[in-house]
Amino acid sequence: DGGITQSPKYLFRKEGQNVTLSCEQNLNHDAMYWYRQDPGQGLRLIYYSQIVNDFQKGDIAEGYSVSREKKESFPLTVTSAQKNPTAFYLCASRTGRGSGNTIYFGEGSWLTVV
Amino acid sequence: GESVGLHLPTLSVQEGDNSIINCAYSNSASDYFIWYKQESGKGPQFIIDIRSNMDKRQGQRVTVLLNKTVKHLSLQIAATQPGDSAVYFCAETSNFGNEKLTFGTGTRLTIIP
């Protein structure tokens, strides 16, 4: 099936550790995104990438890093610099630039700091 | 900064009735709007979209209305079913922007059997 796959679904992080969330898509989409969602809140953009080997900071990029070495993959690393990382993380992709190209989401990854 | 907001955080509707979820936006350059449905613990699902050159668009049991004059968007769900219970988000983007999709806080819709 075509779609966006996020892994792991649940992840626990100790204080001071870096963790990486995986996002893979087989939709041949150019643009990929990472959003963070806190309970009862909307989605906030962390990073996005419009093309391979290029990415831009979103609204809350501090404490996060990404890479886009392949079109299909856009992993997100939550670093120890992120002071409040417990949240629901959503990866998304869309086919091209400009309006009218809908963003589709993966099923999300829950990250908890223990 | 620009933002997208919702008028009501919660809405309860009797099964079979119609529901209307509202959304206000502030970016006058927004030209593409999307409604998403998010069930608990899952990613948002695309419901329906509308471009700024349209006032109304219909899908299966859903209609989106856009009023650019007052920067208001609404989602109408006809003959609601228990499976419609979820959080609904509106989102907007601009062709002249940087490809970001800005989301509102969301409205939790509960269908009462």
Image (tube, coloured by chain):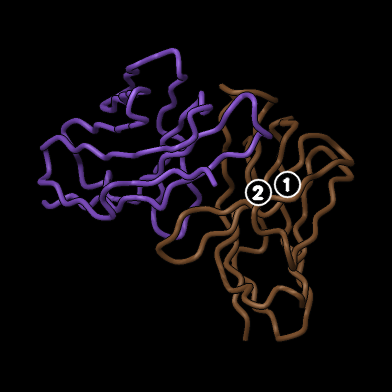
Q: Which residue matches tag 2?
A: A5
- Residue A94 percent coordinates (x, y): 65, 32
Q: Is residue B104 above or below residue B70?
A: below
- Mark 2 touching mark 1, by CB under 8 A? yes
Q: Which chain is purple?
A: B
Q: SS of the residue at dot 1?
A: strand
Give the amino acid type for the residue marked by disc 1 in the picture: Glu
Between B68 and B9, which is closer to the camera in this rendering? Answer: B68
Quarter where residue A105 is shown: top right
**Mark 1 falls within which chain?**
A
Q: Earlier in the sequence, mark 2 or mark 1?
A: 2
A44 horizontally vs B107: left or right? right
Between marks 2 and 1, how big is the CA–CA gap?
A: 5 Å
Q: Colour of chain A?
A: brown
Pointer 2 and pointer 1 on the same chain: yes
Q: Which residue matches tag 1?
A: A24
User: Image point 28% across, 55% down: which residue?
Assistant: B9
